[in-house]
């Protein structure tokens, strides 16, 4: 029951975001950027967070449907790092 409620809330949020005026969308984007800042701080502070982050990304790399993203990442690395 709780899962259904959560799913309904997420679906409603997505629909509301799609239909929102630009000011509300900008507010959402600013809030999202703040969450990224918090996640970056967690990355710096927490070994457990870094391990979890690495685990998710390592799993991602295992699947063939991710090949295009991996190839683009390699090209970006070669372009910007070398």
Image: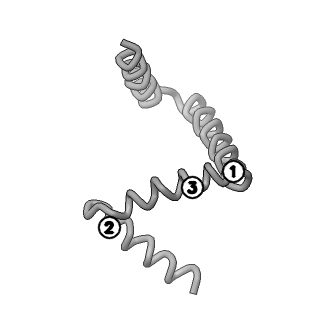
The answer to which of 60 and 48 lies nearer the viewer is 48
Measuring 39% from the left and 57% from the top, which residue is drawn there? 59
Task: Give the residue furthest to the bottom.
Answer: 82
Please report whichever mark, 2 or 1, sits nearer to the chain's N-terminal start. 1
Left or right, residue 36 beside residue 19? right
Please report whichever mark, 3 or 1, sits nearer to the chain's N-terminal start. 1
Where residue 77 sits in the image (x, y, percent)? 51, 77
Measuring 60% from the left and 55% from the top, which residue is drawn there? 50
Residue on which the image places disc 3? 51
Residue on which the image places disc 2? 68
Measuring 29% from the left and 61% from the top, which residue is drawn there? 63
Please report whichever mark, 2 or 3, sits nearer to the chain's N-terminal start. 3
Q: Is residue 50 above or below residue 20?
A: below
Where residue 72 sits in the image (x, y, percent)? 40, 71
Left or right, residue 61 beside residue 50? left
Which label number is shown at residue 46? 1
- At numbered mark 1, what does the secondary structure look like: helix, strand or loop? loop
């Amino acid at each position: 029951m709780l899962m259904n409620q959560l799913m309904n809330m997420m679906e409603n949020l997505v629909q509301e975001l799609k239909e929102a005026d630009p000011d509300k969308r900008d507010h959402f984007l600013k809030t999202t950027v703040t969450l990224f800042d918090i996640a970056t701080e967690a990355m710096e502070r927490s070994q457990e967070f870094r391990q979890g982050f690495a685990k998710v990304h390592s799993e991602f790399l295992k699947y063939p449907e991710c090949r295009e993203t991996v190839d683009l990442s390699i090209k970006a690395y070669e372009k910007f790092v070398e």
